Image (tube, helix red, strand yellow):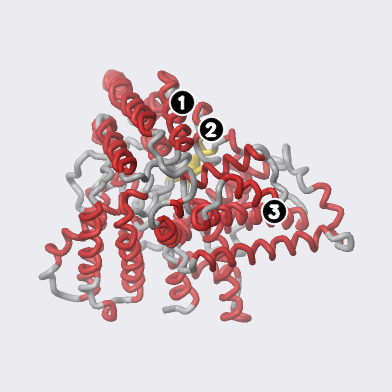
Amino acid sequence: MSKKRSAIIASLFLAALLLSVVLFRHFTGNENKRFETYTNDLFCQEVAGSTISLHYTLKNPEAYGIDHAPVTFGYCTTDTTAVCASAENALAVLHSFDRSRLSRENRLTYDILENYMVSAHELAPYALYEEPLAPLTGTQSQLPVLLSEYQFDTQKDIDTYLELLTKTPEYFHSILEFEQAKSESGLFMASYSADALIAECQAFIDMEDQNYLYSSFEDRLAATGLPDETKNAYIEANSERIKNYIFPAYTELKDGLTALRETGKNNNGLCHLPDGRKYYELTVASETGSSRTIPELQQLTQGQMFADLTDMQKILSPSAEGASVSSDLFKTQGTLLENPDPACILEDLEQKLKSNFPKPPKVTTEIKYVQKSMEEYLSPAFYMIPAIDNAADNVIYINEGHLPDDLSLFTTLAHEGYPGHLYQTTYYASQKPDPIRNLLNYGGYVEGWATYSEMMSYYYAPVSKEQATLMQKNTSIILGLYALADMGIHYEGWTLLDAISFFRSYGITDTDTIEKIYDLIIADPANYLKYYIGYVEFLEMKKEAMKAWGDDFSQKKFHKAVLDVGPAPFQLVREYALKKK
């Protein structure tokens, strides 16, 4: 599930760091031990700041010394002064350690923490520019899924879950207060973005008794082995809380957005806001993990697109041996796989890892399907990141409403499963990294790796090499167009008409489709860049590795090197994976 690194979300993290000043000012001893104690304490403070975060990060919090944590979703803050002060203190605490005396692994953690804190410090003054609500990736979309997947390992988990449901109104109220502060500052979202969120909230409310928060609760309860009388009491309590807390919270959010929908002063990109271009630059750096400037990213994107187009033209050239496949390019829709069962596809993809990737750890994966009534509002698929002390149990959700054919299912499962998110997450967990690393979000690395994996999977599919190349390059080019549009809209100030003209120059003429893309980009700046820029950064690193390692280069060696470093900004991945810092 998506998690943005921002001043809003980072506020609790930074407050924990501020508290650490007192805890570690007088701590003495071995520098590595001192640093590890610090990061462990930081991890525990941060993860306990949200019940959802705690439950999804740790199956057994007691093993980490977390015995009592408040039941809360956390909150959105509008106090930019406090966030800025916390960010400054956070860096001061980190810099109190002597980096030169740390082990290589601890230096890596130190460097990543420093990058993360600097980014949070730079973004802190722009807290009100952030947006907790967005189509597909916003709180309103993700919270129901997170609640429906909240596992009951103990009876205490059930009690905590039911108490957490009662906190939904206050959590949503804090989001509305944040949106009202945005409105007062002239930073509220475009009216059409608000309309999309209002419709989504209404669709969730309209499910009524068919809402999956009812059925999923009963399914999870059935596996607990509790007496029927106890189960029935819990089912009644869950039903009462959904009706009295969840639905009213969504109703308040819908009504609040309705009241604010016309207060937005900008229906276009971030660069139309005061200092919006600077905020976009910082957001792109944070979201992608790339140190390149926006013009450099535009040049990188155009270069990759040109290379992809050149490869396609070679195949489609009348003199090319594979020219005959050009007419079959879009004939892969429908039945392509002998067995389109997702579990079988995952198993097949896992087997294909052997020659080019490190051996994956043994895990189990459950495939679930998005409820039909919510297909329109959720991504085509998503991987639920498991607890760090229970990485063997994994879940992938499939949205059948967004997967029109077998090949889409195949490549999507490669993105979410093998060698994508599931593989990268569980492999990295098997390396036993410092726990704090699991709380530092580097979307460019994570989504870039999954996109890189998805692109590789075309060559694993049961199609000819020429078809695989054409389809993979075509997909890459489309993502490149989205990336250029994102930068064009938010950095250069494109209007909808500009976006239509841009896409039409590449043969995409459906105005309704272009308008939907434009709306998504407006509502979630830099989201597409995580996927595309992250993917291209991995391609660029592979070129660098091939040049540096020469005859010693292999796919498996390269993949192991970048996977061992784990989620990080790409400059640090380069330094530690390629240069062996």
Q: Which residue is at 63% across, 37% downward?
A: 512
Q: Residues within 10 Å of mark 3 (few under 14, many from 20)?
A: some
Residue located beneath label 3 in the image = 474
Element assignment for label 3: helix
Q: Given the image, on which type of amino acid does mark 1 rest? A: Ala
Q: Which mark is residue 376?
A: 2
Q: Residues within 10 Å of mark 2 (few under 14, many from 20)?
A: some
56 relative position to 312: left or right? left
Element assignment for label 2: helix
| Res. 550 image quadrant | bottom right
* Residue 212 in picture, x, y percent from top left: 43, 27
Q: Given the image, on which type of amino acid does mark 2 rest? A: Glu
Element assignment for label 1: helix
State yes or no: discs 1 and 2 in contact (Cβ < 8 Å). Answer: yes
- Residue 506, can we see it? yes
- Count all numbered tags in the image, as a single digit: 3
Residue located beneath label 1 in the image = 203
**Residue extending furthest right?**
319
